C-alpha cells in the first residue's frame, strides 16, 4: 500500500491511464475484428471499407503507445495483402 502522498497520486494516475489504454485497445480490436469478419465473408468492398476504417485506429493505438509501431505496421500490411488477395 502506498504511504506517501505522491505514491497515492501515482496510483490514481496509473489507474486512469490504464483505463484509457484499455479503451483504446478495445476500440482497435473492434475495428480489427470487423476487418477479419469482412475478409472471412469474402466481400472485397466490405473488406476494403473495414480496412480503411481500421487503419487509422491501429496507427493511433501505436502513436498513443498502446501497441508498438512495428506491430501496427505489420497488422496493416498483412490486412492490406489479404484484402488485395480477395478476388
Image (cartoon, grey):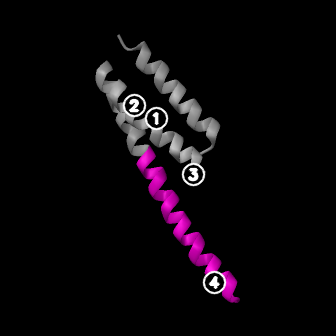
Q: In the image, residue 78 lies at what x, y percent? A: 52, 25
Residue drawn at 55 percent across, 65 percent down = 17
State the residue position of label 1.
55
Q: How far is disc 1 from disc 2 in space, using C-alphas?
A: 6 Å
Secondary element under disc 3, as helix, strand or loop, is: loop
Mark 4 or mark 1: whose residue is earlier in sequence: 4
The quarter of the image holding the N terminus is bottom right
Image marks 4 and 3: residues in contact by CB distance under 8 Å = no
Q: What mark, if any, has residue 64 been given in the picture?
A: 3
Q: Vertical placement of 7 versus 61: above or below? A: below
Q: In the image, residue 36 lies at what x, y percent? A: 39, 31
Mark 2 or mark 3: whose residue is earlier in sequence: 2
Which secondary structure class fits the magenta region best? helix
Image marks 1 and 2: residues in contact by CB distance under 8 Å = yes
State the residue position of label 2.
52
Mark 4 or mark 2: whose residue is earlier in sequence: 4
Between marks 4 and 3 in the image, the one whose residue lies nearer the viewer: 3
Residue drawn at 35 percent across, 32 percent down = 50
Image marks 4 and 2: residues in contact by CB distance under 8 Å = no
Q: What mark, if any, has residue 8 been given in the picture?
A: 4
User: Which portion, as a residue range, is magenta?
Assistant: 1-28
Residue drawn at 38 percent across, 44 percent down = 30
The quarter of the image holding the C terminus is top left
Secondary element under disc 2, as helix, strand or loop, is: helix
Mark 1 or mark 3: whose residue is earlier in sequence: 1
- Residue 33 occupies quadrant: top left
Amino acid at each position: 500500500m502506498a504511504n506517501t502522498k505522491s505514491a497515492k497520486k501515482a496510483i490514481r494516475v496509473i489507474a486512469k491511464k490504464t483505463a484509457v489504454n484499455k479503451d483504446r485497445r478495445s476500440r482497435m480490436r473492434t475495428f480489427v475484428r470487423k476487418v477479419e469478419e469482412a475478409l472471412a465473408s469474402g466481400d472485397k468492398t466490405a473488406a476494403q471499407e473495414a480496412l480503411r476504417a481500421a487503419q487509422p485506429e491501429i496507427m493511433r493505438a501505436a502513436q498513443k503507445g498502446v501497441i508498438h509501431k512495428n506491430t501496427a505496421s505489420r497488422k496493416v500490411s498483412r490486412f492490406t495483402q489479404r484484402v488485395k488477395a480477395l478476388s
